[in-house]
Each structure stands twice: as structure tokens, then as C-alpha cells.
Amino acid sequence: MLDGNSENCCRKMEKMLFDNLNCNPNQSIEQVLEPRFSLHPIHYLSLKAYIVLFSAYRVQAVNFNSTDLSKDEVSNRFKMARGAAAYSLLAAGATHHLFMSECFIISNTALFFWINAGESILCLARNTSSLHQVGGSRNNCALLESKFALAYECRSHEDLLLVSSQFLKDVSGVVKTLWRYLVEGFSYLELIENPVDFTWLGVSSSHLSYTLDRDETRGKFAEGKGILENYPLYQLAVYCLTYGGFLANICYGSECHLYRKVGDLLDGIL
């Protein structure tokens, strides 16, 4: 983006990702996996590209003056906001996959991605009146367990795995509702089947087989889900923010800036 043309940079970077995924939409997953990827979707270079694309699209989305916009400009603004939300979610999901293998090494990084994803999705939900049928309204939205999850004390590695596994299960359900909408018009993202569960790539996900005690985990992310089930954009934002806050509490404590920031963002929704 040194030439100041962020749109051109985004196009080139997405083409690079698309070409290296080596995937034809008409192929079966077996055919896709047979010649291995030149650049795997959860490779660290891919992750760096997601961060650049998320940042660029976010800047493009907020750089519009809300007044005197043509219909095409408004449409482009919302597309950029969708792109920012999708790439931030993909970056968070890829980091989460790595995080579940090395929890205490990468949790410091993972929390930033989940908070960024939550902010981007929340911004998209708040700033587009055309999304009501997809994202709903924040009126009467409440997810009471978010406060519980933020305050939950993680006493062991097992506790962390339990909460993280429940989070992934709950957030995956909401992602299935929204992902096709978020990625429409983005060639590379349209090839990504699920941004938070990479089993479709044939990679192992040990956390998916982790045994969950429903009585222990109920209330951390699942309880009260029905209150927001008609507002998936807000629901997804709350899940991402809550989990980011949960990790921030583990890494830095409840007095840290990031933890308080998440609390303020959630207060604006509830």
C-alpha cells in the first residue's frame, strides 16, 4: 500500500491467496486436497495477509463520508465493511486453531484477534440499515451469560479447554448463518467453507473431540443464546468480544485496558 492505492493492493493480495489455494469451486474436497496447497489457509503468511486485508478494508469502510454518497458508494462501503468483518473473523479462527494446540503460548495473540473480530462485526451490525433481515436490530438484545463468561475464573488448562471448546461450538453455529453473506463478492473468502472450523481442510482439530461436560460449561457461552438467535450479527459480535475478554482476563487480569474495553462494548449492546 506504499503507493496509496489500498484497493489495488487488496485485489493483488486476494488474487495471490486465491491462486495459491489451488481450488476449483466445482471440485470435491478430495480433489482439492489431493494436490497440496501452495499456501495453506492457516499458514502464518496467510494469517499476515488476512491482517493486512482486514486493516485495509476497515479503513476503506470508515473513510466514507456518510453524507452525499451515491448508491454505488454506499454499496461499496458496506462491501468493505463485510470484507473487514470476514477477514477479521478468519484471522481469529486461524489463530484459534493454532491456539488450541499451544494455549499458553498464543493466547496473548488470540485475544487481540477475537476482540478485533467482535468490533468489526459489531460495527457492521450497527451501521447498516439494510442488514436488518440478516443481522437484526440491537433492540432488546441481551446475552446475560457474557458477564458470567468474562468473570469466569480459569483455574486450570482443562478449564481453558472446556470454555474454548464450548465457544467454538456455539460460534460455529452462528457463523453458518452469516458466512455466505459476509463473503459475497470476495473470491478468496468464497472458497473458505468455515472460518472457525478447519476440519474441511483435512487438518486435525483435537479440541473438537475434547469431551465437554454440558453442566460445567452451560452458562459460559450457551445459556441465553435464544435471546439473540434472531440477531446473528449481534450474537456473533457478542461471542467474539466475550471470548476475547475471557482471554484478556487470563493474560492480564480484570483491570487491564482490553478487558474494560470489551466490557464497555458489551454494555453498548446489552
Image: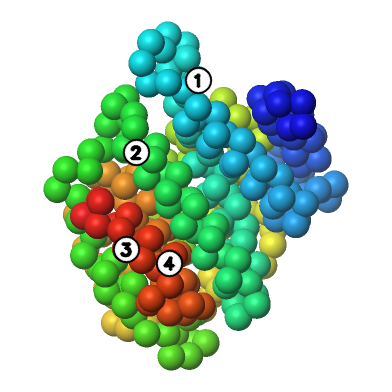
In this picture, residue 38 sits left or right of residue 43: right
Residue 208: mark in rendering: none
Query: Which mark sits nearer the N-terminus, 2 or 4?
Result: 2
For the residue marked with disc 2, what is the amino acid?
Answer: Ala
Q: Quadrant of the C terminus?
A: bottom left
Q: Quadrant of the N terminus?
A: top right
Tell which residue pokes out farthest to the left in this image.
140
Which residue does the numbered mark 1 point to in the structure image? 76
Q: Secondary structure at mark 2?
A: helix
- Find residue 21 and report its image quarter: top right
Query: Which mark sits nearer the N-terminus, 4 or 1?
Result: 1
Counting labels gives: 4
Q: Nearer the viewer, residue 65 or 205?
A: 65
Query: Which mark sits nearer the N-terminus, 2 or 3?
Result: 2
Of circles 4 and 1, which is in front? 4
| Residues packed near mark 4 inside 10 Å, few (<14), some (14 to 19) or many (20 plus) | few
- Residue depicted at x 60% and y 30%: 186
Q: Secondary structure at mark 1?
A: helix
Of circles 2 and 4, which is in front? 4
Residue 125: mark in rendering: 2
Q: Nearer the viewer, residue 119 or 258?
A: 258
Query: Which mark sits nearer the N-terminus, 2 or 1?
Result: 1
In this picture, residue 84 sits left or right of residue 34: left
Q: Is residue 121 visible?
A: yes
For the residue marked with disc 3, what is the amino acid?
Answer: Gly
| Residues packed near mark 3 inside 10 Å, few (<14), some (14 to 19) or many (20 plus) | some
Residue 78 lies, with reference to residue 27, above or below; the image says above
Could you give the CA–CA distance between mark 3 and mark 4, rounded to whole angstroms?
Answer: 10 Å
Query: Which mark sits nearer the N-terminus, 1 or 3?
Result: 1
Which residue does the numbered mark 3 point to in the structure image? 263
Which residue does the numbered mark 4 point to in the structure image? 257
Of circles 3 and 4, which is in front? 4
